[in-house]
Amino acid sequence: MRSHIWHGRALVEIGLLITLASCAGLRPGVPGPGVPVISNLRIEPRVTKPGQTIRLRFEFKDPDADVTDAEVCYVRTERWSRATVTVGDCGHILIDPSSLKGTTAGLIEAPHAWSRPARYDYEAQVTDAQGHKSNVLRGSVTVR
């Protein structure tokens, strides 16, 4: 029985590694002229209840005013009775890119609500028309 429990734990750990590898999609761009930069990631509130709206915000600057995409990815981690497991739940929060076009600086907001108790880890990034990717910002929220 003990080896079976250990074996199950090993499978959970292997699943965790595979999930993290598949969700680590946002890679920072190379800084330089014309490359957008993001800063000041804020998630409010940091601890919340299922169904309550949280607001994820960050600022961007792009001297060329050609940001075409804002992306927020997340990974959900749940606490189970005997283990903490990163669920294969990697996703994206949609942000309307039309509000960014022609703007050299601004605030990007992504309000949303989670229905499941878990820890949600976020990554945020913007991309411009030339394909330049900004730096990546990270933050988290706990839903209890």
Image: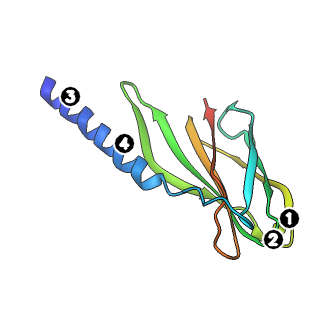
Residue 130 lies left or right of residue 106; in this view the side is left
Mark earlier in primary sequence (4, 2)? 4
Q: Residues within 10 Å of mark 2 (few under 14, many from 20)?
A: some
Q: Whole-percent x and y of residue 105?
A: 86, 59
- Which residue lies at the image location 65% right of the left edge and 54% below the top edge? 135
Query: What SS does tag 4 mark?
Result: helix
Mark earlier in primary sequence (1, 4)? 4
Q: Which residue is mark 4?
A: 16
Q: How far is disc 3 from disc 1 in space, using C-alphas?
A: 55 Å
Q: Whole-percent x and y of residue 66?
A: 78, 73
Q: Residues within 10 Å of mark 1 (few under 14, many from 20)?
A: some
Mark earlier in primary sequence (3, 1)? 3
Quarter placement of the N terminus: top left
Decide if residue 116 is in sight here: no
Q: Which mark is residue 104?
A: 1
Q: How far is disc 3 from disc 2 in space, using C-alphas?
A: 56 Å
Query: What SS does tag 2 mark?
Result: loop
Q: Which residue is mark 2?
A: 64
Callout 4 amino acid: Leu
For residue 83, what is the image quadrant? top left
Mark earlier in primary sequence (2, 1)? 2
Callout 3 amino acid: Ile
Q: Which mark is residue 5?
A: 3
